[in-house]
Image: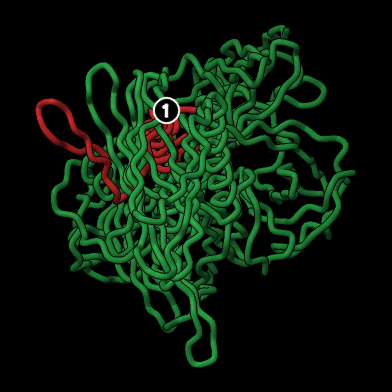
Amino acid sequence: MNLNFFSNRSPLFEFKWYIIIVIAVAAFMLYHDIPGGRMFTTSKTQEWKASGPGAHK
Amino acid sequence: MYSSIIQKCPDCSNLLSFSGTHTNIIVCSHCFSTINKNKDGSLVKKPHFAIINNKGIIQAGTIGKWGKKEFTILGRFRAWFEESVFNYWTIAFADGEYAWLGEGYGIYSILTEYPKALQLNPSNLQADIGSRRNLDDTNDYILEKKYKATRFEVEGELFIPDNTVSTFRILEFSNETGKNLTYFEFGNGNIHAFEVVYMNFEDLKLQGLREYDNTGKTFICNSCSQSIHVKTFPYAQSCSCAACGSQYALNEVADFKKEKKAKPTDVIYIPIGSIGEIDNTKYEVIGYVKKEENNIYHSKWYEYTLYNHQQGFAFLSVYEGNWIFIRENCNSPVLINQNEKSFEMGNEPFQLFNSYSYKVLNAVGEFPYNIFDNEKAKAREFISPPEMWIQERDHKEGITWYFGKHISGRSVSSAFNITDMPPKRGVGAIQPIGYVNRFKMFLAALAGFLFLLLLHLAVNSVKQEKVLLDASYDFNDTSNFISAVTEKYVLDKNRSNLQFTIYAPVENSWMELSATLVNAKTGKEYSVEKGVEYYFGYSDGESWSEGNKRRSAYLKRIPAGTYFIQLDATRESSVNRINNFYLTITYDVPSSRNLLWSFFLIMLWIVGKYIYINIKEKERWSNSPYSTYDDE
């Protein structure tokens, strides 16, 4: 099976953008999962350090 | 291996070399007489026509391969049928076996005698096109073509089952398994069956080819006296005068006879004589024709006839700016039931898209077969974008299949170096739109979900979910405020989160918790606030409630370090105020929210794609009388 999904001979050709989207979404999910983040939250965490207040998501 | 037999030409006494005992006609290389070898080995001059001009690239002495078997080409007979010519080259294999190589119009085949075939009698040869019969132990065969060869010409050394005749008949049968049988009748019930295997030019690995040398045919237009040169004659058997539009078709004596006159006024986007490359093959544009459907739609489309001396003829068909590249293909579907609306070929389903008969409105250039007498032919188009099979069925000419594939306007423009192209409208019959069937979409969604789930589980399987604090706090009677500081905790992961789960027995009341995580070394603080409220009551006889007694809050992406937590809780100062609340602080927790959002994001593509495909497919099938989409 031709796994190069950008080649129109590959059976995966019609899914080329879907595969890229799934990989991108997976990467986005890992970006949040690994350091304990949460996707698309509206609440912000107040952060304070000696140089002054701030916030991070 | 075959051994030569040397004999003398009965006409000029030049030496003739027969390669073996199987061949029975030879053209003398000295006097060009055609000599028959009788069964007793004696030679007699026979008035077959010898091929002098219009030679293709294959010649006696060319070698090739069929599978693993090497062969040498000895010679051919070129048969003239009602609207076509076809070559049958005698080939000798190294093991002493003989066969024919069928060649013409870019179609190549190997024909080997098939003694297992049912022996037909002359009355069987009157069968109608499309009739079925059993010819061997496999499936039923369909009669697809019937031809009569009115004469034939010879070149080199060849075998023909009856070398005394000058005409013969052919019946071509095919079955659903892709097997093809051709019966040749040489008169007096002398009927021979051949199994036919079709292949591409490249598969034959031919060597020792000659330069393409075809002088064509030139004649004078009856209407305007201009000279008309048919460069691919005898394969092109119809043409049109470029000057006045008079249309000509070849008659029985190989002269072009005028059919009618129709001067074209169309814009011919690809000029006759243009050369362009498609699928790594250089084609010359030799003809242009405008056709119209014979039905209520009167749809008009245009076809450009292309020619390459190896690949034969091809066509570029354009309708409303949508292009299809088409070639005749004998490895084609076989429809036992001629009214079928779908079939499967190469594991792809093809659906009936259109069926029509057509007429030629006008034409320029030259064309294979006679394109001016096809008004009774019925064409049916079956699509599986970006591919198409076209069946043309005529009671005289039989069933012919063409295979088409989508080609973009940009590719055509670039191949022939043209800038002015017909404007594109709508979705072409086989224009690819990234169609994916529902089952495949479902499988793709499932695969995506499983992939994300497994990734999520893998990452979260190493989450500590360590409970740092699980305590209850009581409010003083005299105060609505609690402040507390926890012990120190070591958060050891590079970055992670803290979950604060608050349970407060509020009823028509509220409380709020503010938590500040303080790094004991650096003093850096991270804080979060969360309110808990729950209200309920009765209104118009129905109970209602709002809020939740249990809420969660998070501190995210907290770097490693030693921390303590400052807690400040406030309650409502009313009669419904609570006395206590419970707090659980957990470190390094998984977030199923991330997985659900990820599912949602990939579903956006799935749903968006589904909607897009539906819109585009509806547009495609709006051009078809076989559409299953409701008209709005």
Amino acid at the residue labelled 1: Ile
Q: Residue furthest front?
A: B478
Q: What residue do we see at 73% from left, 7% from top? A: B1
Q: Above or below — where is B497 with respect to B237?
A: above
- Give how far across and how far down residue B322 sits, in percent: 32, 58
Direction from residue B114 to residue B522 in the image, left or right? left
- Give how far across and how far down residue B609 sits, in percent: 42, 55
Given residues B65 and B339, the one toward you in this image is B339
- Please name the colour scheme applied to the rendered image: by chain
Q: What residue do we see at 32% from left, 45% from top? A: B514
Q: What residue do we see at 23% from left, 40% from top? A: A46
Splitting the image into 4 quarters, where does residue B336 fall? bottom right
Residue B305 visible here: no
Residue B395 visible here: yes
Q: What residue do we see at 58% from left, 51% from top? A: B442
Q: Given the image, what chain letter belongs to the residue carrying mark 1?
A: A
Q: Above or below — where is B88 with respect to B185?
A: above
CA neighbours of label 1 inside 10 A, class few (<14), some (14 to 19), many (20+) = many
- Give how far across and how far down residue B35 sits, in percent: 63, 26
- Give how far across and how far down residue B89 sits, in percent: 60, 29
Given residues B509 and B260, the one toward you in this image is B509
- Colour-to-chain, green: B
- Colour-to-chain, red: A
The residue that mark 1 highlights is A34
Q: Residue furthest left?
A: A51
